[in-house]
Image: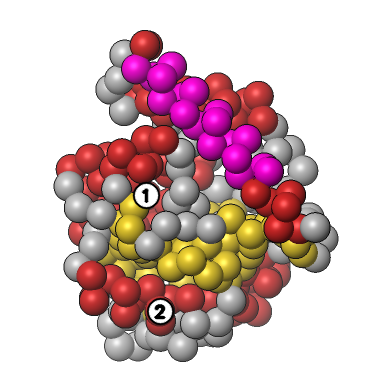
């Protein structure tokens, strides 16, 4: 196989129910890529589901010998990747066709450090909620401090940047911390305001436990190096935006 342009990193733990849809959406992108599935010790039939792809040169299945968490699994995938660019996709989400192709064009045109897209919120059974989360065309560090508009499963960035800023702190929003560090160093993120990402609202996930998510967001600012007072200020901004997002999505779904 020729060197892939994009390496897609997909961490999974007990993902037998949804992972086939995620994998198939990767192979509909129409760009030279490889898919690395990092299995964090699944005890269900995830490996059996993925055995259908074993003969593909653009597919690699890596099973962790011990639990590494989502952050550690993504980092392992980045370390093993051969592509110029890295994309992340969780095993219960999926992409519309054309996502990676448009992201590659935007990164080349703008020279920005990473690219994110909008997302459509999906029910656990894969049907739509009628709600979409928009993303700005240009995302600055101060914008990201106010709220995390960059969803991990929508991101495309260069591999050297992913290696320089590995994900940490699974007890918090590990991806949010990483995006903050990247933009704080300098540069911007480009947003494509199309819901290329289909984001599944799984029961019990971080996105559904609001109190847990709020505490984790506060910890993001602490891990980013801010004191308690400034972290509280940023958290208040996050909370206000959360209320706006809820109202926006509710109006759009009516």
Determine whether the residue tagged by mark 1 lies in a helix, strand or loop. Answer: helix
Q: Does residue 122 show up magenta in the picture?
A: no
The residue positioned 46% from the left and 42% from the top of the image is: 148
User: Neighbour class for label 1 at 10 Å: few (<14), some, many (≥20)?
Assistant: many
Quadrant position of residue 206: top right
Q: Closer to the camera, 84 or 234?
A: 234
The residue positioned 31% from the left and 39% from the top of the image is: 142
Residue to which mark 2 is pinned: 102
The residue positioned 40% from the left and 81% from the top of the image is: 101
Residue 220 to residue 93: above or below: above
Residue 24 to residue 209: above or below: below
* Disc on the earlier residue, 1 or 2: 1
Give the CA separation, mark 1 to mark 2: 25 Å
Q: Is residue 117 left or right of residue 254?
A: left
Q: Looking at the image, can residue 50 be seen?
A: yes
Disc number at residue 75?
A: 1
Provide the residue span drawn in magenta.
230-247
Relative image position of residue 14 (x, y in whole percent): 69, 51
């Amino acid at each position: 196989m020729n060197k892939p342009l994009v390496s897609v990193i997909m961490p999974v733990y007990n993902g037998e129910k949804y992972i086939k849809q995620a994998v198939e959406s990767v192979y509909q992108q129409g760009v030279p890529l490889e898919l690395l599935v990092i299995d964090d010790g699944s005890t269900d039939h995830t490996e059996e589901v993925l055995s259908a792809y074993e003969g593909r040169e653009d597919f690699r299945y890596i099973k962790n010998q011990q639990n590494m968490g989502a952050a550690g699994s993504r980092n392992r995938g980045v370390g093993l990747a051969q592509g110029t660019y890295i994309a992340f996709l969780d095993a219960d989400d999926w992409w519309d066709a054309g996502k990676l192709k448009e992201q590659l064009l935007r990164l080349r045109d703008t020279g920005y450090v990473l690219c994110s897209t909008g997302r459509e919120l999906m029910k656990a059974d894969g049907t739509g909620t009628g709600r979409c989360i928009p993303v700005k065309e240009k995302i600055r560090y101060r914008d990201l401090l106010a709220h995390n508009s960059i969803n991990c499963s929508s991101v495309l960035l260069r591999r050297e940047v992913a290696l320089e800023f590995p994900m940490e702190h699974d007890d918090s929003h590990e991806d949010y911390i990483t995006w903050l560090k990247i933009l704080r160093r300098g540069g911007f993120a480009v947003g494509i305001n199309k819901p290329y990402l289909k984001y599944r609202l799984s029961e019990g996930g971080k996105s559904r436990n609001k109190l847990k998510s709020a505490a984790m967001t506060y910890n993001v600012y602490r891990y980013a190096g801010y004191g308690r007072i400034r972290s509280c200020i940023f958290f208040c901004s996050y909370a206000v935006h959360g209320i706006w997002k809820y109202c926006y999505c509710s109006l759009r779904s009516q």
